[in-house]
Amino acid sequence: MSLPPESRNSLLRFLSDPVAQAVLSEAEPFKLSKRQILHMRGLPFEHVYFIERGVVSVIADVDTTRDIEIWLVGHEGFVGLPLVLGSASSPFKRVVSIGGEALRLSADTFQDLLAHHPELQRLMLRYAHSIAIQTGQALACATRHSVEQRLARWLLSAQDRLDEDALPLTHSTLARLIGTRRASITVALNRMAESGLVDLGRSSIGIKNRDALVELSCKCYGIMRAANQAIYD
């Protein structure tokens, strides 16, 4: 797999050409496979990943039986945020939820690029601020809003990161990521399907009526989306 002539990653596309090329010249194409672990909690980062296509979930360890997703990374972001903030490791796990491709750099190379390109460092800090807002809002959402609202928010967020209407996800995967029972996800999805919001296929969910899905979702979706768009203001 060769390097793309123009990256799909929003962060790389926002950089000036010289800085973007400095990053791309050090990057290697990397295939993302579903359920692949990119980083184990507590271990030092060996690589960072600028996502080109696909979705990576950042997972918190809640107890011995449950993991819960705390934010999503698609082509709007990258995996390796603690390195920007001066930490070599993280208590969270990074797992591929939807397969795709990324551009991978070694952690040492990425830190050298940050040191030599203030423009890159500023952009990464803006991204970090966006993630702080999104994770805080996701926590508030989990404590106050229904499964159906949270599921609508998650589906919309995943669609934003894939730019596709068909999401290759199972009910079990969604239940794990949202932090609820599979039966609750199935009930919520069936209601959405009956209302014409989604199509349910085998191991996939199709977004059929995005506007209605936005209306069903809580206002957290709009807040989190605005936080991501503010990176580029």
Image (cartoon, rainbow, N blue to C red):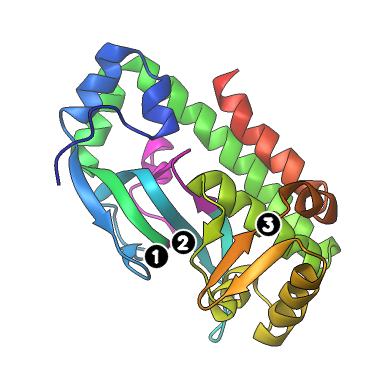
Residue 37 shown left or right of residue 157 in the figure:
left
**Is 37 in front, or is 14?**
14
Nearer to me, 165 or 63? 165
Point 60% across, 34% down: residue = 228
Assess whether residue 4 is covered by the magenta stretch. no
Between the C-alphas of marks 3 and 1, the distance is: 36 Å
Q: Identify the mark nearer the N-term, 2 or 3.
A: 2
Q: Residue at x 53, y 53 (%)?
A: 72
Image: 42 above or below 163:
below
Q: Which residue is mark 3?
A: 208
Secondary structure, mark 3, is loop
Vertical position of residue 137 compared to residue 130: above or below? below
The answer to whether marks 1 and 2 mark residues whose Cβ atoms lie closer than 8 Å is yes
Question: Which residue, given by chain and number where applicable, does mark 1 sit on?
Answer: 41
Q: Quick one: label 3 or label 1, which is nearer the N terminus?
A: 1
**Residue bounds of the magenta highlight:** 72-97
The answer, for residue 99, to whether it is visible in the render is yes
The kind of residue tagged 1 is: Arg
**Helix, strand, or loop for circle 2?**
loop
Mark sitting on residue 92: 2
Residue at image position (36%, 68%) is 34
Residue 191: assigned label: none
Pointers 3 and 1 in contact (C-beta within 8 Å)? no
